Each structure stands twice: as structure tokens, then as C-alpha cells.
């Protein structure tokens, strides 16, 4: 993964200072607030997805969006337009409009909302065990259902851990690191 980042840096896509990389400055790769206070994300890096996004938003041919996608001088005006546009409607509006397309869009969901999303439900990403929402381990190559062990009551292993620490001389190490 580091070589990918270094390659992107070499090609001018990643800068050493915040706010100057494609992932933290491009208006087509950002998070926006909606009218209801929820957020959405867009990540239309590739031109075909950027075109789909503009078409879906009714911005294809708009004067603020006619210069090339990577025209960084146009980014502040485009960001302002997109921010105002997304702020005009609630998140559900944008989900209904953009989820059926290839616009590289996503609603920012809470863990509970994500667990209830049809995409996540169909893939069995979440489960509830002992009243606690949990992510199911992935990848699951064998197709077997995941069966988590029950959680121990707090303090179940305290004595064992304390004895192990005592035998390992952890008290002496702790005393050496603790200021007097």
C-alpha cells in the first residue's frame, strides 16, 4: 500500500501538506452535509463516473463544470456549488437519486443504519450477539456461518491475569516506569 501512496505522490496526486491532495481537496472526492444534518460522500475520480455524477445532479454543461475535471483552479467554485446543492435536500433524497447510478456516491451511515442497509444485510456483514451489534469477520472463504463465543462477565479472568503479571515481574517493570 505504501508504494501506491508514494507513486501517487510522485505523480502529483498526493502532496505533503494537508488540503493539496486529490483525497482532501478535490470537490468530486469529498464529504458533504445535507439539509437534515446527515452526510454523503462522493468519490468520482475517474472521468466516466464524474460524468455520471454531473448528469445525475443536472450539472453536465453547467458553466462552473465545463472545464476539465482536474482543473484545480475550478475546484473552489465547484466545491461551493456542490456543497450548496447537497445542503438543499436531505440525505434520503440523494440516496434515492444517486444510489441507482454509477456516480461513486455513498451515504454516511451510523453503525446501526449500516447494519440495516440492504447491501450489508444481503452480504451478512453484521450480526447481533448477546444484544451487541458486531461485524462478522471477513473474508469468509468457507461459507460457514460465524458463531462467536459468549463474552465473559467482567472480572472473570482478573485473578489469572494478575497472577501472570506477578510471576512475570511486571510489578518491578511498572515501578521502574512510574514516576515517584
Image (cartoon, grey):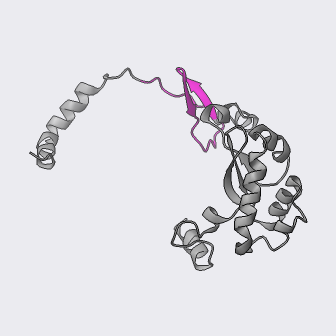
Seen from the viewer's position, the closer of residues 92 and 113 is: 92
Location of the C terminus (image quadrant): top left
**Residue sticking out furthest to the left:** 180
Looking at the image, which residue is at 74% across and 46% down? 87
Q: Which residues are magenta?
A: 126-151
Q: Quadrant of residue 69?
A: bottom right
Q: Position of residue 77 (x, y in %)?
A: 74, 65
Looking at the image, which residue is at 60% across and 69% down? 21
Above or below, 42 against 93 in this view is below
Above or below, 117 against 50 in this view is above
Location of the N terminus (image quadrant): bottom right
How many numbered dots are placed on residues in this image? 0
Q: Position of residue 70 (x, y in %)?
A: 74, 73
Above or below, 69 against 133 in this view is below
Seen from the viewer's position, the closer of residues 153 and 177 is: 177
Asked whether residue 45 is in view, the answer is no
Magenta run includes residue 142: yes
Q: Position of residue 85 (x, y in %)?
A: 78, 51
**Majority secondary structure of the magenta segment?**
loop
Q: Quadrant of residue 71?
A: bottom right
Magenta run includes residue 54: no
Q: Quadrant of residue 19?
A: bottom right
Looking at the image, which residue is at 38% across and 20% down? 153
Q: Classify residue 138 as left or right of residue 116.
A: left
Asked whether residue 125 is in view, the answer is yes
Seen from the viewer's position, the closer of residues 90 and 162 is: 90
Q: Position of residue 64 (x, y in %)?
A: 82, 67
Amino acid at each position: 500500500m505504501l508504494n501506491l501512496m508514494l507513486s501517487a505522490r510522485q505523480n502529483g496526486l498526493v502532496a505533503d501538506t494537508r488540503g493539496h491532495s486529490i483525497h482532501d481537496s478535490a470537490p468530486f472526492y469529498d464529504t458533504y452535509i445535507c439539509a437534515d444534518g446527515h452526510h454523503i460522500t462522493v468519490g468520482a475520480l475517474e472521468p466516466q463516473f464524474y460524468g455520471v455524477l454531473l448528469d445525475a445532479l443536472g450539472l453536465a454543461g453547467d458553466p462552473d463544470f465545463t472545464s476539465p475535471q482536474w482543473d484545480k483552479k475550478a475546484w473552489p467554485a465547484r466545491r461551493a456549488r456542490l456543497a450548496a446543492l447537497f445542503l438543499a435536500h436531505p440525505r434520503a433524497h440523494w440516496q434515492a437519486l444517486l444510489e441507482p447510478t454509477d456516480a461513486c456516491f455513498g451515504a454516511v451511515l451510523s453503525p446501526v443504519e449500516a447494519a440495516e442497509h440492504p447491501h450489508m444485510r444481503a452480504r451478512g456483514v453484521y450480526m447481533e450477539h448477546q444484544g451487541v451489534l458486531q461485524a462478522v469477520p471477513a473474508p469468509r472463504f468457507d461459507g460457514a456461518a460465524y458463531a462467536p463465543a459468549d463474552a465473559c462477565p467482567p472480572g472473570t479472568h482478573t485473578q489469572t491475569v494478575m497472577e501472570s503479571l506477578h510471576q512475570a515481574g511486571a510489578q518491578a517493570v511498572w515501578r521502574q516506569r512510574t514516576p515517584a
